[in-house]
Image (cartoon, helix red, strand yellow):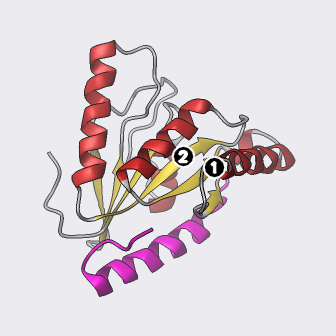
Amino acid sequence: MCPKPSMPEFAFIGRSNVGKSSLINMLTGNAKLAKTSKTPGKTQMINHFVINDNFYLVDLPGYGYAKRSQAERQAWEVMIEKYMRQRENLVCVMVLIDSRHEPQNIDLAFLRDLGEWQVPFNIIFTKADKTTQKEAYKHARMFVNAMRDEWEFIPRSFMTSAEKYLGKNELLTYMGELITEWNAQGTPPAG
């Protein structure tokens, strides 16, 4: 199902319709690479995209989509957990959070799972163009503050807009640093 783990990879996940595919397309400059849809639940498999023969971007199914059967949702959850816990070349999971909304329990619960599984992650706030800048940053601060109740270390976060290319350079620079570190170590960096 997954390609040989020969290159570092970054997995993108978030609630259904948070903008995973749009963000991947923005980062790669290819509007047709990852399939986008206005309908939640479009991504149903683990999709690997090779970037410059250097690393993988991975588009994962969204979590929390209620219009799928319980059996389908459970199968996705098992598939995602297995992938995240066993994929040795997974450098980092990029957890996408919709900046238009106040902190959601489903997102905080997913971060708890990542912590329990000891999977390194960062937070990417999406859709900053769909609300005011003030509102987007307010919600991001609220989310980080909600994390402080449980987390000793808060990972780096990014504010993005796939339509306005906001955050593209910062995110690609950061990923480049992690790739350099991974290549130097030959294994994924911790944290």
The magenta-colored residue range is: 164-191
Position of the N terminus, as image quadrant, is top left
51 up-or-down from 78: above or below: below
Identify which residue is drawn at 22% across, 53% down. Answer: 86
User: Could you tell me residue 38's position as x and y percent?
Assistant: 52, 27
Identify which residue is drawn at 39% across, 29% down. Answer: 42
Identify the disc placed on residue 96.
2
Say which element carries label 2.
Answer: strand
Give how far apart the Cα atoms at labels 2 and 1 are. Answer: 6 Å
Identify which residue is drawn at 38% across, 56% down. Answer: 118
The quarter holding residue 4 reads: bottom left
Residue beneath label 1, please?
A: 125
Neighbour tally class for label 1: few under 14, some 14-19, many 20 plus, Cα within 10 Å: many
User: Could you tell me residue 6's position as x and y percent?
Assistant: 18, 69
Say which element carries label 1.
Answer: strand
Give the farthest residue toward the right.
Answer: 134
User: Could you tell me residue 123's position as x and y percent?
Assistant: 57, 54
Callout 2 amino acid = Leu
What type of secondary structure mainly makes up the magenta span? helix
